[in-house]
Image: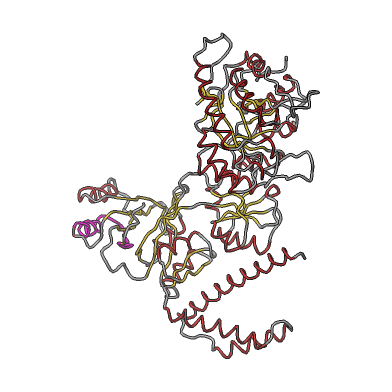
Amino acid sequence: MKPEQIRKKISKIDRELLVLLQERMGLALRSNKFKETLSDPQQENDMLARAERLNLDLIESTFTRRLLHTIIDETKRLQDEDRSLAAFQGEHGAYGEVAARQLVPKGAYIPCLEFIDVFRGVEDGYFDLGVVPVENSLEGAVTQVNDLLTTTDLKVIGEVKVAVSHCLLATEETDYREIRQVFSHPQALAQCRNFLMRNKLEARPYYDTAGAAKMLARENPKAAAAIASSLCAELYDLEIIKEGIEDGPSNSTRFLLLAREPHPDNGDKTSIIFAVPHKAGRLYAVLKLFADAGVNLTRIASMPLRSDPGNYSFFLDFEGSDKQEKIAAVLKEMEGLTKWMKYLGSYPADKTI
Amino acid sequence: MKNLKLVARETKARTVVKVSGVEIGRDFVVIAGPCSVESETQLLETARAVKAAGADMLRGGAFKPRTSPYAFQGLGIQGLKILEKARQETGLPIVTEVVDPRDVSWVAEFADVLQIGTRNMQNYSLLKEVGKSGRPVLLKRGMYSTLEEWLNCAEYILSEGNPDVILCERGIRTFETYTRNTLDLSAVPAIKELSHLPIIIDPTHSTGRISLIDSMSMAAAAAGADGMIVEVHHKPEQALCDADQALTPDIFATMMRRLRPLASFLENLPSESTAKTNRIK
């Protein structure tokens, strides 16, 4: 190995150490919610024993002990900070984390495998907050999330629009001319369809954009690339081959912030879901209430009701808070017209939307 | 020239190639920039200077076909990213060379115009690939090629469904050694007789002498060329390739100041039936 290569390898390892520590801290904060942490001496002995078993001649036990103490002290300091645990779907570097960082500035961002893990985790109190995408400007509704919004009891307490700029990422050793398959979340692949077609690349669906980047960095499959955020290039030490490869010039995703309790103050935007019976003019009658009260609607979307095929649930966002009299009156009247109705919450609107 | 079904003069009205606001075949278009992209500073400084002097597009090579395999081969995709940055900053569309058919779709992701260099003029697989790229192509004349051979190469690109070809006369090999090559200026009116495609000239590679560039550019404008492509480097003495033929930004700006009055003069000449008038902006 040449000095240059050795230097590169060392800096790669240092980066991986930091990413692993980040993961460890996240887990420690999560364990805080259970009030039963592994005792420190136990952990210390385990680690020392492991070092011995591995016969790591360069890692002496005094160093191991010092290192562990430093990590444990930092963990305790973090636990005392009492940060909000904000869960998002995907690995670190996912767009959900980008949104979470904007919505919960001083939070601890916890990756989850599936959307349902975010919802369940918040419901069961393992996380304080959840951040989920509801709609993309190019691809439309994120149906899984909209479905979970109807079936769970969480409240919406905030929203943010995140500009999505996809990058084509590959490991340093990969020659871009040899790339044949591109891993990413199906939504991201769909948003870059023209780019993939122009360059004759095969789309390979993966559970997450950042997960694809992480897999690429760890497994380095042949002739492969990933589509993910530029944050992922940094986190997983990947090369950005091309930035801004999405088809539309303005690609953005709207994320909602979820909590168990509604927003304490007066919001200026409200979200509800409802279903109406199959009767002529019933949907119209509901919408007329808003028109008559002079309430501006910002989103109307319909989705098939899973529990009741042939019927639809309607997602409605409008300006104003349920604490305003005219809106409270509209909601009250709506109850009589709908088959089913769910109030998601009033919250501060993202003014850029 | 029987086989020129698509590029022949009689098949079509004069082609105007549109590249984000620049119209090649209507205005006298000036493409300027360094031989190769060497660094972000080098390219951005040169881009700002040529923009200020009134250039319409930016050139810069990321893939260099060099005579010697040991000469600087270009920064590759890194160079393309720097070119993209320069476009974002200056708004100048990017012209860059592609040398490998496997690179065509990737270079097309970054550049506005794909350049086929003189050594690759008859690289038919490369021509077919740029014909499918959906980007305008600047096709340089092979240094040993006849006009007919050259136009046949353009025919290759058009036959793949790409109508936007800009021809570029860059000098041919003769027995003369004082100049690097001999700029065949008669190719300009000759191509105008034979084809509807726009033609520009390259005074840098054809003469290889800084002192001749200004005169040959003026002569090309007078001959009816649709523009020129010229090498400018913010610090020519430090250039990694063709250091002795790049103009400094100052000399380039002076030349641009001389070209403008010539243009308005040419515009006011009584027009010959076949000649077309070009405006120099």
**Is B14 in front, or is B43?**
B43
Is the residue A17 above or below the residue A283 in the image? below
Q: Position of residue B109 (x, y in %)?
A: 59, 42
Dividing the picture into quarters, in which one does residue A65 lie?
Answer: bottom right
Question: Which of the colour schemes (rainbow, by chain, secondary structure, one colour) is used?
Answer: secondary structure
Q: Position of residue B25 (x, y in %)?
A: 56, 23
Q: Which residues are magenta?
A: A326-346
- Residue at the extreme right of the image, as rendered: B175
Q: Position of residue A56 (x, y in %)?
A: 72, 82
Is the residue A214 above or below the residue A203 in the image? below
Assess whether residue B245 is covered by the magenta stretch.
no
Q: What residue sits 56% from the left and 34% below the top?
A: B57
Compared across the picture, whether A88 is left or right of A2 comes to left
Q: What residue sits 59% from the left and 47% below the top?
A: B82
**Is B267 in front, or is A133?**
B267
Q: Quadrant of the N terminus of chain B?
A: top right
Q: What residue sits 57% from the left and 41% below the top?
A: B46
Compared across the picture, whether A130 is left or right of B64 comes to left
How many callouts does the rendering have?
Answer: 0
Is the residue B178 above or below the residue A139 in the image? above
Q: What residue sits 55% from the left and 53% below the top?
A: A186
Q: Position of residue A269 (x, y in %)?
A: 30, 57
Assess whether residue A329 is covered by the magenta stretch.
yes
Is the residue B37 above or below the residue A212 in the image? above
